[in-house]
Each structure stands twice: as C-alpha cells, then as structure tokens.
Amino acid sequence: MKKIRVDLGKIQYDIVIGTDLLNQIDTFIKGFDFEPKCGIITDTNVNALYGTTLKKILESSGFECIIFQVPAGESTKSLETATGLIDQLMENKFNRHTPVIALGGGLINDLAGFVSAVYMRGLPLIQVPTTLMAQVDSSIGGKVGVNYNNNKNMLGTFYQPKLIISDLNVLKSLPKQELSSGFAEVVKYGMILDKSFFEYLETNHKLLTDQDEGFLEYIVSTSSEFKARVIERDVRDETGIRAVLNYGHTIGHALESVSDYKGYLHGEAVAVGMAYAAKISSRLELMEQADVQRQNQLLHSNGLNLNIGDIDPAGLIKAMDFDKKQREAGVVRFILTEGIGKAKLMDGISLELIHEVLGGTIEL
Amino acid sequence: MKKIRVDLGKIQYDIVIGTDLLNQIDTFIKGFDFEPKCGIITDTNVNALYGTTLKKILESSGFECIIFQVPAGESTKSLETATGLIDQLMENKFNRHTPVIALGGGLINDLAGFVSAVYMRGLPLIQVPTTLMAQVDSSIGGKVGVNYNNNKNMLGTFYQPKLIISDLNVLKSLPKQELSSGFAEVVKYGMILDKSFFEYLETNHKLLTDQDEGFLEYIVSTSSEFKARVIERDVRDETGIRAVLNYGHTIGHALESVSDYKGYLHGEAVAVGMAYAAKISSRLELMEQADVQRQNQLLHSNGLNLNIGDIDPAGLIKAMDFDKKQREAGVVRFILTEGIGKAKLMDGISLELIHEVLGGTIEL
C-alpha cells in the first residue's frame, strides 16, 4: 500500500493506493472522529458491483450505513439530483459529523462531492474512485460540481475530502475502453512533468492490459503524487500553475462538447487533444517530431484513436474555452510541451495555426 | 481609513473601514485584475438607497455594471432566488473574472456569497455590508448560504471575498433598532475576548446614538479585527476555536427559530442569549454577579431587551443545537464566560440548570 499526503496548508489529507482496500474500509474510517453512521452515494452500475459489499463491511463494524443510489449517466449530474440527495440526507438526519462515501467514477466524485460540500456547509467526504480516470485524476484536486442549463460543471466549488481510497482491485471490472481512457491522463503526466515516468510507461505499458498489480500501483501512485504536488501550489486554479494539467484538454473538452458528451470517454477526447497539441508544438519548433511520434505511439498502442475525423475545425475552435479578448485578437493562450516532460503555457498562439493543424490528420 | 488584513494561508484579503468609501469603490476595484464589468446583488431597500449611486460611480470609471435586485426579507434567502440570480449571471455572460458586489446586510452577504461561490466554482466577490451587524460580524468569516426546506442556512459553503468595504456613512440610514442589534455583537466581542474593549464601550456607548465617526470606526475596526483573528485559527469552524463567537447564540438562535425569524433581529436575540448565558455563568460561580450586571446594563442601555418573556423554556431548549448524545445524557456543551473578556467552552452543563435559568427573569 502506498500513502500520499496532500498538504493544502490548513487542510491535509491522504490518498491511499493498494489492492483489496475496500475490504478494509472500516479501519480507514475508524481513524476519524465520525458518527457511527454513513452514507454511500453511488450509481446503479457501481452499486451492483460493490455497494452491498461495502455496506456489509461497514455495518459489521458498527456503522449504520445507507446507500443513496442514482442512475448512471451524465444526465444524473444535475442540480435536481443533488437536491434529491440532499433531501434524503435531511430525512436521514445527516449532520456535519456523518461521513459520505462517494463510490464511483468521476461523475459520482463530482456529484457526491458537491452534495457534501454544500450540505450544512460541509459533510466529511471519503472519495472511493472506481475508475482509473477517477483514481489518477478526477478524484484529486477538490473540484466538485454539477451541470446546469446545458453547461458542464456550471455549479460547483472546491471541496477537499478527508481521504481518498484507490483500490486497484476495482479496476479489474473496468472495460478495456475505460482503462485506455484513464491511461491517457497517465501519459499526460509524463508529457507535462516527467520524462523518466514517460519512458517507464513506454517500456511497461503492456502490463496495463495484464492488470499487473505492481504496474497499476506505480502508475496510480505516481500520477496521484504528480497531481497532488500541482494542486498544492494552486488550490483554486487561479495562478496558472494548475493550468498545465489541462494539456490536451482545450481540444479534448471542445470535442466532448461538440459531440454532446456522447462520442468520447473523457480520456479518449484528451488523447486526441494531446495529439493535436503536440502537432502545434512541433509546428512551432518547440518539440521534435520524434517526440511527437513517441507520445502518439504510446497513446495509440493502448487503444486510443488520435484523429478528430470529420469534425469541423471551425466548430471545434468555437467550442474551445479561450479568453474572450484573446479570441477576438486571434491569438490565444495554449498549453504546449517543449519536448517530453515539460509543459509550457504559451501566449500568442494564432487561431489560424490551430485551425490549420486541426484540418490535418495525425500520422503514426 | 483603517485596513485589516485577513490571512487564511493561501487566501488573503483586506477589510477596509472608513467614511465615504462607497464613493471611491472604483479605485478599490481597479486594484484587481477583473474584467471591466460587474454585478451588484442587492435588495429592494438597499438598492433604493445606494444601488444607483454605486452603479453610476462604477460606470463613470469604465465598468459595465448590472444591478441584480431581490426582494428584501428572509424568504428571499432561498435556493430558488440563488438559481434565479445564477440564471441572470449566465444570461449576462459572467465568467470567473467578473466580480460580484454584495451590497446589503447579512442576508445579501449570505445569498450573494453563495451565488458567487458556486457559479463556475467561484466568481470574485466584494462584500459591501450596509448594516452594523454585517460590518462587525456576518460579512467576515466566509460563511455563505441559503435556507432550504425550512432549515436556516441548510445549503452553504465557506467562501472568502476578495475585499470587504465597510463604509460607516451607510450606518446613518439605519433605524435605531438595527444599530442596537449590531451593537449586541460588538458587546459580545468585549465579553468573550477583551475586557478593556468592553470598558471602552461602557464609557463611550452613548456615541453610538450620536453616530460619532471616530467611535464607529473604532468599534467596527476592532470588532473586525477580533473576528479576523479568530477565523484565521479555525477557517471551517472545526476546531472549537471559532465556537466562542457563538456566545449568546445557542439561546439566541433558538429564540429566532421558535419565533419563526420574525420576532427578533439577530442581535436582539443574541442579547437575550448573552443575558441568560451570563446568568448560567454566575450560577456556576464562573462570573461575579457584578460583571453580569455590567454586561446587562451595557446591552439594556442601548435599547436591547433581555428577557425571554413568556416563551416556554422547554420549547426553547428543544430548538437549541446540541450534540444528540449529550442532549440524551442531559449534559451539554455551552459557551460561557469566566468574567468579562474571557469566553470558555464548557462541557457538562446540565439541561436542568439551563431550564431553571430560562424560567427566571433578568434583573437589571
């Protein structure tokens, strides 16, 4: 088992990573001064796999435990679902000492996190991410929220959990496509922060399909550590430090948006975004073509498609989140890489260049 | 002009206190890297007094400025009003760099603060408290929220402003009763934290009715400083340090609750709570009767009634916010004072004693 301490000054918590942690969840929770009662917020899919088991373990160690189940799928991430959960917490007399366990992928992390953040100004939150994506990225950093009026993550806040438990066993139930999606974010950390980690992934990535425990523990703990160190320096995403985590995301988010959050898993869209961002880096002579190829090969050989296909570049650019004034001036801020392992927040990237690059294809 | 720095580690901001600050609001706001656009969230009463003036000042210095007006009154502090405001912010394309000015008393501070906290995970917030209560207490500390399903402040979070502007001029438009209500919190700081400040109030309190600028600046800045120093040590109200600020509030909140938030201004209820809390302190021989008298005299001579009248003590105790287990055991935690200037969080106070004291009257 690995333990990573996240130190945000006045708030500190651990990420624990290892195999078979869900079966020991009671021992983790007993370390806090909680009421002997808890709620599990989860979706129908995850509940069928782990909900009852978790509830039994908690009950056998003296916790009253209530499962609050929501439908799986993006439409669940709404203010209506959130207030529905809040109503149920109120009916069950939850108070500021009753913990909520968010059991699921990114959607559940965001939704249950938001509910925990605003209920009586904050319930103790335990994140139990059940996808590789959530373990290496979305459960860490405190971003919680729901969609509103067709705007993704429109309502939200920053709220830190008391603990994150990343059990590697649960990754075994994931479809291959979900693993690949999470792996895109893992590769991203290598590209933006650490060349030697990237090279480790190049050498060992076949162990992902084998679900090799040592490999999984290493990539989840290293990724968690990377993300923790970045957010520690920019908790509320204000200084630009945290922006490097969005490598591949400017295009990726736009792809998800124009395809109405249906065509791509998040990491699949990010992989495409990384491929095109690398092409821009190469065109600006920030990165050698050989390094671009290495990134793309690593993504592609893990089942990630890198071409945007027949999506219109102009529509995609319109969906990108740029500063209004910069967009009007035709030159925007973009997250690029100067070779493998080094992200750079670049100003003055022309929309024309982005448009041109998006019009081309990614060669492997 | 006085300036008090609030240092919460990664987040820091100023409270500025002085006369005629509203007329200089543009200079304060220009110090930040905001878009030249802002929203003013205010209620009908305050808008009639200061809304248009503020808008004109901001517009004449190049800000686009939109007033979002809500009805005055407790029923406005709802999730429906909050989402209504959010809808308007979205229509007007507010983003994370567009500031919101909360212009009003505690209700507007809470409501506009909540909207700012959750809109895109946080808009820059400028608090402009317009009551003595809001200037010395409710605008400071980051507690924001709305009522929900008949539960006071049920949904909320902790969200810190970029700046608090306490203009003493606006206090001139307050009814006497509002000033007295705010003054109860000022006396509270003396009782829990600083005997010499209490004695200053005893000597000079008549200057309150005269609206003496020096006196107002001193009590607002000293109170702000007291509150800032307490919240710095307990930002999320978790360690018990912040609990001392609730002196007089256990009974006060219960009084407000049983009277359906209609019979008392907040400070009026707190004053009653302080009188009965002091009586408990005296019964436990923590405080001399002479000090109890001094507190009560100071409150009473500023127009604050200290008796609960014909309210049933049992019902009042039922409405108090005690730990469930402690309540069942009949002995609870209560904030008392050991003489003037020294609060003490006491465990083991019997409900029987509280009941008995509440059954009696406060003699002056």
Image (cartoon, coloured by chain):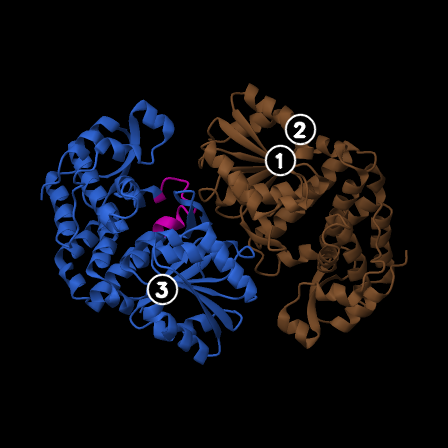
Chain colours: A brown, B blue
Image quarter of the N terminus of chain A: top right
- Crowding around mark 2 (Cα neighbors within 10 Å: few <14, some 14 to 19, many 20+) is some
Q: Determine contact: label 1, label 2, CB under 8 Å.
A: yes
Tell me where residue A338 appears, x and y as whole percent: 76, 62
- Crowding around mark 1 (Cα neighbors within 10 Å: few <14, some 14 to 19, many 20+) is many
* Amino acid on which disc 3 is placed: Thr
Range drawn in magenta: B229-242
Tell whether position A304 is magenta. Answer: no
Q: Which mark is residue B44?
A: 3
Residue depicted at x 71% and y 57%? A257
Could you tell me how far apart the alpha carbons at marks 1 and 2 are, in whole angstroms?
9 Å
Residue depicted at x 60% and y 45%? A110
Q: Which mark is residue A137?
A: none
Vertical arrangement, residue A101 with respect to residue A324, above or below: above
Tell me where residue B82 appears, x and y as whole percent: 47, 55
Q: Determine contact: label 3, label 1, CB under 8 Å.
A: no
Q: Nearer the viewer, residue A246 or A218?
A: A246
**Mark 3 or mark 2, whichever is nearer to me:** 3
Vertical arrangement, residue A290 with respect to residue A12, above or below: below
Q: Which residue appears farthest toward the right when viewing the image? A: A364
Q: Nearer the viewer, residue B4 or B187?
A: B187
Answer with mark 1 or mark 2, whichever residue precedes in sequence: 1
Label 1 sits on residue: A42
Residue depicted at x 29% and y 26%? B331
Q: Are marks 1 and 2 on the same chain?
A: yes
Q: Nearer the viewer, residue A151 or B219?
A: A151
Q: Secondary structure at mark 1?
A: strand
Tell me where residue A31 appears, x and y as whole percent: 52, 29
Could you tell me how far apart the alpha carbons at marks 3 and 1 are, in whole angstroms?
43 Å
Label 2 sits on residue: A50
Q: Which residue appears farthest toward the top when viewing the image? A: A60
